[in-house]
Image (cartoon, rainbow, N blue to C red):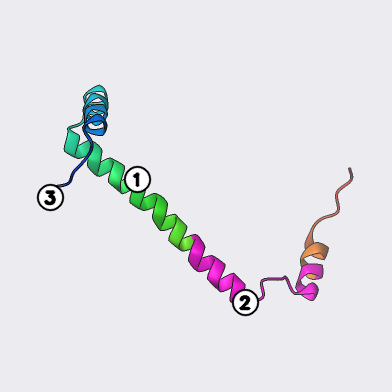
Amino acid sequence: MQIVVSIPHPVVASADVLARQIGLSRSELITKALRAFIEEHEHDRIREKLDEVYAAEDSTLDPVLARMQFLSLPLEEW
């Protein structure tokens, strides 16, 4: 798919230099950069959703379960 976007000349020039250095076309470089940017922000959305869940739900550990977990650990000498 082809699209038309406006990118400032200095950014395009830097992209062209980098693309040549790493052996990619400009399109490949821009595609990789967009994928990385999108992926980074998808993690932000996941974190936001988790924050919503834990804001509404109690996430403290049940004291009985916490004690059982503690007791299940082997004794260690320091």
* Quadrant of res 32: top left
Q: State the separation of the CA atoms marked 1 and 2.
A: 32 Å
Task: Read off the residue under disc 3.
Answer: 3
Q: What type is the residue that disc 1 sits on?
A: Ala
Residue located 40% across and 57% down the image: 42
- Looking at the image, which is closer to me, 8 or 67? 8
- Looking at the image, which is closer to me, 72 or 46? 46
Query: With respect to residue 13, does 7 lie above or below?
Result: below
Task: Read off the residue under disc 1.
Answer: 36
Q: Do the residues labelled 3 and 2 touch (CB within 8 Å)?
A: no
**In the structure shown, which secondary structural element does the residue marked by tag 3 occupy?**
loop
Q: State the separation of the CA atoms marked 3 and 1.
A: 19 Å
Q: Which of marks 1 and 2 is nearer the N terminus?
A: 1
Residue located 76% across and 65% down the image: 69
Residue located 71% across and 71% down the image: 60
Task: Read off the residue under disc 2.
Answer: 57
Q: What type is the residue that disc 3 sits on?
A: Ile
**In the structure shown, which secondary structural element does the residue marked by tag 2 occupy?**
loop
Q: Do the residues labelled 3 and 1 touch (CB within 8 Å)?
A: no
Q: What stretch is highlighted in magenta?
A: 47-67
- Looking at the image, which is closer to me, 11 or 60? 11
Q: What type is the residue that disc 2 sits on?
A: Glu
Q: Are marks 1 and 2 in contact (CB under 8 Å)?
A: no
Query: With respect to residue 57, does 19 lie above or below?
Result: above
Assess whether residue 64 is covered by the magenta stretch.
yes
How packed mark 3 is, by other alpha carbons closer than 10 Å (few <14, some 14-19, many 20 or more), is few
